[in-house]
Image: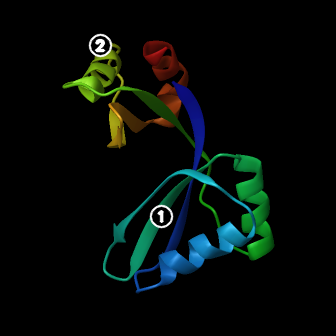
Amino acid sequence: MTKVELYSVVVPNKPGKGAQLLAAFKEAGVNFTAIWGYPVGKRRCRIDLVAENGALLKKAAKQLKIKLGKKQTAFHLTGEDHPGAVAEDLAKLAAQKINVYALQALCAGSGRFGVLIQVDQDAVKKAAKALA
């Protein structure tokens, strides 16, 4: 389990806006651990970003005049893929009465999985202990 910094960017919900954003970060040398986007109403899209280097992401965003949302802490877990792998991690949080408000999980191939879990920022320390 690794604690990661997560930042959000809101862009117009139009073709190519996400590609432009990621191309700008690519040119700045930012590499991402995770990216996911979803609509916020009909006209905007929120793109959540977890960079390998949060400081580089913030520096690049400032130079590119891209407004990042407030830093959030999330948890990145990886492991051997098996039925219930993510459920096991969620059960650890539930046992401590920690509410998960977002998660993204994928099979990583070769029998591996990865998941990003977001909890209320007030529960980060407690969640880190539960997931350790």
Q: x and y percent of residue 60 in the render?
A: 76, 64
Q: At label 2, which amino acid type do we have?
A: Ala
Read off the residue under disc 2: 95
Dividing the picture into quarters, in which one does residue 93 lie? top left
Q: x and y percent of residue 106 in the render?
A: 33, 43
Depth check, mark 2 against mark 1: the one in front is: 1
Counting residues from the start of the chain, the first of labels 2 and 1 encountered is 1
Residue farthest along the bottom direction in this orientation = 15
Residue at image position (49%, 33%) is 75
Do the numbered discs 2 and 1 sit on residues whose CB atoms are within 8 Å? no
Q: At label 1, which amino acid type do we have?
A: Ile
Residue at image position (71%, 47%) is 53
In the foreground, 36 or 119: 36
114 w.r.t. 8: above or below: above
Badge 2 marks a residue whose secondary structure is: helix
Q: Which mark is residue 47?
A: 1
